Image (cartoon, rainbow, N blue to C red):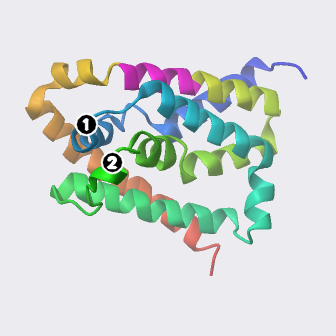
Amino acid sequence: MIIDPAQLLKSTMVLFAVIDIVGSIPVLMDVKRKSGDIHPGRATLVALGIMLAFLFVGEGIITFLGVDVNSFAVAGSFVLFFMALEMILGIELFKSDPSTMKTATIVPVAFPLIAGAGSMTSILSLRAEFAQLNIMIAIIINMAIVFIVLKNLGRLERLLGEGGIAILRKVFGIILLAIAVKLFADNAKDLV
């Protein structure tokens, strides 16, 4: 297998746009506020493991379970939709049970926020066009960026301040809502 710079660049950019770790900063700050802490290394490694596993065996697993990619994407769109509503309306739909918030690094940060339906669907789409090696390297590059953002979340929080975070939450809540609606619309029509 040969590394193709064009495939690598395209794969990296597609995954960067879909993962949208920069746009997820308000959601991450909200999760951190509710849970007390997010472990950057653990979240990154879990998301990396999920995405690499999905690269190699994802389509087979989904097919084996009798679930198609479109159903998977629609289910993910519901999770994103409710997370967006929390951000926009300032309400709490996902209850903060102390026992479940201890696992916030894994759910919802690693999955479905980082390695969610959008990124998994994108990985399956990229597999149809590009070599697995290039996609694998693109995933690793994106996980390095995710780790840097998660590691510096406290600094970003201090830099933005309470007002900046509130504005970001509303703006990115609307963006997340739009992504959820688009993900639903693009995949629901194929289910009917």
Please tell me which residue is depicted at 76% across the width and 58% down the height of the picture. Answer: 61
The image's mark for residue 101 is 2
Give the quarter of the figure containing the N terminus.
top right
Q: Which residue is mark 1?
A: 36
The image's mark for residue 72 is none
Q: Which residues are magenta?
A: 142-151
Q: Name, please, the residue furthest toward the left.
A: 163
Decide if residue 155 is on the left or right side of residue 106: left
Residue 65 in magenta stretch: no
Where in the figure is residue 73, as x and y percent of width and height?
Answer: 57, 61
Give the residue type that dot 1 points to. Answer: Gly
Q: Are marks 1 and 2 in contact (CB under 8 Å)?
A: yes
Q: Quadrant of residue 6?
A: top right
Where in the figure is residue 98, as x and y percent of width and height?
Answer: 27, 51
Please tell me whether the stretch drawn in magenta is mainly helix, strand or loop: helix
Please tell me which of labels 1 and 2 falls first in the chain: 1
Give the residue type that dot 2 points to. Answer: Met
